[in-house]
């Protein structure tokens, strides 16, 4: 009795198909179980605080809806003010002020996200007097991370 390879292939596919249906039928007979989500370890950048990317993205999206100028405009204002080329532009909540932080060389230029006015400049090696810094035209409540302190670096 000669069996054609064609029929062997069809039989093999049929058997495998029935095995798959059997597993599906068995799985559907099992009670539905809900697996509790696992807490994912939070990454730290070495400063003792954890990074919460989802919260940062949510805060950034909220700030973006408040900003009246684009990152490109903030970059242009900062470069015109400092006479250099920007390497990075980031929208931030700086002590309740919505500002763009524009990195130019060793300086960080804070540009009002509402009107494009350069508010102040921080250099990498000096701490400015935060009490005397001008406020931006857009104010938001500072974000707290639950430890009783405001999260000044929320971006």
Image: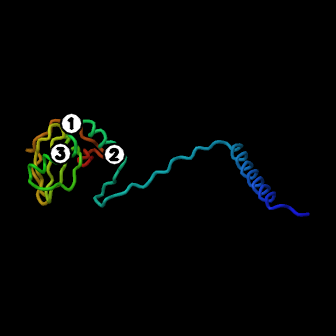
Q: Secondary structure at mark 1?
A: loop
Q: Which of these two is toward me, 13 or 61? A: 13
Q: Position of residue 26 (x, y in %)?
A: 72, 47
Residue that badge 3 annotates? 74
Q: Earlier in the sequence, mark 1 or mark 3?
A: 1
Q: Assess disc 1: are there few (<14), some (14-19) or many (≥20) residues with their C-alpha within 10 Å of its C-alpha.
A: some
Residue that badge 2 annotates? 57
Q: Position of residue 105 (x, y in %)?
A: 14, 59
Which label sits in the foreground, 2 or 1? 1
Q: Earlier in the sequence, mark 3 or mark 2?
A: 2
Give me the C-alpha separation between circle 2 and circle 1: 19 Å
Q: Assess disc 3: are there few (<14), some (14-19) or many (≥20) residues with their C-alpha within 10 Å of its C-alpha.
A: many
* Occupied quadrant, residue 16: bottom right
Residue that badge 1 annotates? 68
Q: Position of residue 128 (x, y in %)?
A: 10, 52
Question: Is residue 92 depicted above or below 86 in this figure?
Answer: above
Which label sits in the foreground, 3 or 2? 3
**Residue that extends furthest to the right in the rendered view of this protein:** 1
Q: Which of these two is toward me, 51 or 113? A: 113
Q: Secondary structure at mark 2?
A: helix
Q: Position of residue 138 (x, y in %)?
A: 18, 36
Residue at 69% across, 43% down? 28
* Occupied quadrant, residue 25: top right
């Amino acid at each position: 009795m000669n069996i054609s390879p064609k029929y062997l292939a069809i039989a093999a596919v049929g058997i495998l198909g029935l095995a798959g249906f059997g597993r599906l039928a068995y799985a559907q007979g099992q009670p539905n179980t809900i697996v509790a989500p696992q807490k994912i370890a939070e990454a730290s950048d070495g400063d003792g605080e954890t990074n919460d990317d989802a919260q940062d993205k949510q805060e950034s999206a909220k700030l973006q809806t408040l900003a009246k100028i684009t990152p490109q405009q903030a970059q242009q204002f900062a470069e015109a003010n400092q006479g250099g080329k920007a390497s990075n532009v980031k929208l931030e909540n700086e002590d309740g002020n919505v500002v763009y932080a524009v990195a130019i060389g060793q300086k960080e230029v804070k540009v009002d996200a509402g009107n494009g006015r350069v508010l102040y400049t921080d250099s990498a090696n000096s701490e400015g007097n935060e009490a005397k810094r001008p406020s931006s035209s857009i104010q938001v409540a500072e974000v707290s991370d639950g430890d009783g302190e405001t999260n000044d670096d929320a971006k």
